[in-house]
Amino acid sequence: MLAFRFVCTIVFAAVALTGTTGAARTQPDDELKGLNQRVIAFYDAGKFAEAVPFQERYAHLIRERLGPEHAEFAQALNALSILYNRSGRSVDAELVAKQSLAIREKIFGPTHPSIADSLMSLGEIEGTLGRKGDQEARIRRALSIREISLGREHSLVADALASLALAMRSTRMRCRGRVGNEAGNLDPRKDAWPGEPHHCV
């Protein structure tokens, strides 16, 4: 919940300081602020589908204001992909998450921390779609980016490690009988199959 709140707040804070002409603003845009608050409230209540139309409107306004290749539009799309996935629209979520990732890679290159955020979202979506090998590969790349750019002790590195452990456990359950260790004893930094990431579907 806190990570999603952070995503929404970051987008709103950035957009609130920029008008349609790029001039500095002293007051936040009331509609953006209201949309932001509604999205967070619905998300915190677990009402993901209800949050979707507000986030769609939010992303539309940011695109109009800042353009289709702006970092804050990519951030808004990433948040929308999370909502789509958690409201049962995983195919739509994947398309939006890939759009967000493409914008970020064009702006920042392949190793910026925001790339890891998009990769984590894509990994969650691919896991929902049953593509466990793809999920693990996305999370491993995100983990590598975060370790290099943020340091191994950062909380977002811990989040990525936890997600990787869950993904590996899920894959190992599919592959039971191929490896000897119990799924619960995984060390995501060390425990893997040769030629990782691995697929067992």
Image (tube, rainbow, N blue to C red):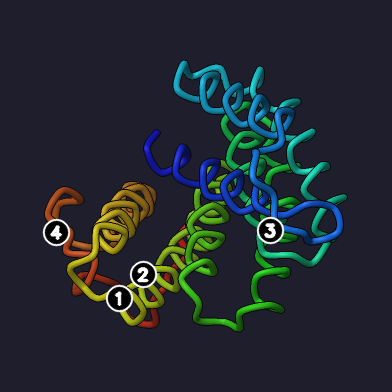
Q: Disc 2 or disc 3, which is closer to the eye?
A: 3
Distance from label 4 to label 2 (Cα)? 23 Å
Q: Quadrant of residue 157?
A: bottom left
The location of residue 27, given as percent across then percent down, is 65, 39
Q: Amino acid at mark 1?
A: Glu
| Quadrant housing the N terminus | top left
Query: Do labels 4 and 1 touch, CB within 8 Å?
Result: no
**SS at badge 3:** helix
Residue appearing at x 71%, y 70% in the figure: 102
Residue named by callout 3:
74
Residue named by callout 2:
143
Residue appearing at x 61%, y 53% in the figure: 14
| Image vertical order of residue 142 relative to residue 121, above or below | below
Q: Earlier in the sequence, mark 4 or mark 3?
A: 3
Position of residue 50 in the picture relative to residue 145 (left or right)? right
Residue density around tag 3, few if under 14, some if 14–19, many if 20 or more, within 10 Å:
many
Q: Disc 1 or disc 3, which is closer to the eye?
A: 3
Query: Do labels 4 and 3 touch, CB within 8 Å?
Result: no
